[in-house]
Amino acid sequence: MRLHVGCAQWTHPAWPQPPRDKLASYASWVNAVEGNTTFYGIPSRSSVENWAAQTPSDFRFVMKLPQTITHERRLSSIATEFYAFAAAVEPLGPRNHAMWVQLPASFAPGDLPMLEAFLRGAPREHRYAVEVRHRAFFDDPRIAQELESILSRTGAEWVPFDTDTLFGRPATSLAERDAWMKKPRVARRTVALTGFPIVRYIGRDSVDETVEGWAYLVELVHTWLTEGRSPTIFLHTPDNAEALNLARFFYDSVRARLPELAPLPEPVPVEPPTLF
């Protein structure tokens, strides 16, 4: 029975972290991370080897495919780029939990044949998780079913980004306003297609509102775990200052319902900075 939780990044000015080995420090708090930086380019192999060295073998990276593949080429004629990316992240070994195919909002139902062709041709040694943002996939049940069928046939998961709490009332801070402009406003999804569901959840500046908004997700994760699934949940807030603490609190909230779930390790203490 395995639950993984994490954040959108492994370093933040508000988090207690040492000057070096920030990923190792982060990995003592939680056991997963979104690989958002890879969207902007393929990392060097030496960087990835360093990531692997700082994390235990059961840590999960959900690595976002580079924008060249998903946004510029739109999954077409991308074999060279994909294999270069796969080779770069190979040192992660089992930590490479899923290749994250985040598609632009312009990727519409008419583009589904490209997605199916990509997933059918993609190497089977990797797991794939697809995030769509076009409203039709959420507003039209027929189109949603078409996408689910493609994902199910190819063994891929649908990654929902739950923004209900964020958009539950008007923004009240600069960080919330920025998130309102950038995050997708789509319907909440609660269906897992595989044994490894992934959910991205964003709350608000208020910790209480964030926690209140994820009550359904605690119940959902409890159900998935009892079904034998192994979910990964990523906790966001508009500025992510409290995201690390919230990820641990979410894990503990699930564990309160399911005591047989092993606890997260105690975070490695961070020594205060010194002058010498």
Image (cartoon, helix red, strand yellow):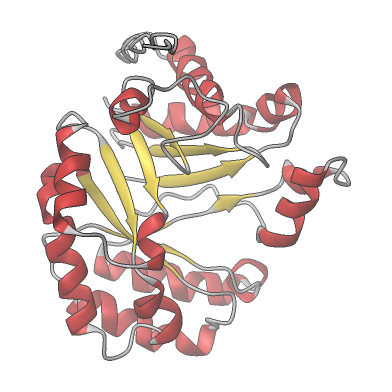
Residue 96 to residue 270: above or below: below
Quadrant containing the N terminus is: top left
The image shows residue 257, relative to residue 33, as above or below, that is above
Q: Is residue 255 above or below residue 25?
A: above
* Residue 108 location (% of width, % of height): 55, 83
**What residue is rendered at 47% in x and 72% in y?**
103
Q: Is residue 84 left or right of residue 130?
A: left
Give the image location of residue 178, x and y in percent.
74, 53
Q: Nearer the viewer, residue 189 or 210?
A: 210
Q: Position of residue 184 (x, y in %)?
A: 66, 61
Quarter occupied by residue 166: top right
Q: Is residue 186 visible?
A: no
Q: Is residue 215 above or below residue 103?
A: above
Residue 137 appears in the picture as rendered: yes
Residue plotted at (51% across, 24% down): 15
Q: Nearer the viewer, residue 197 or 144?
A: 197
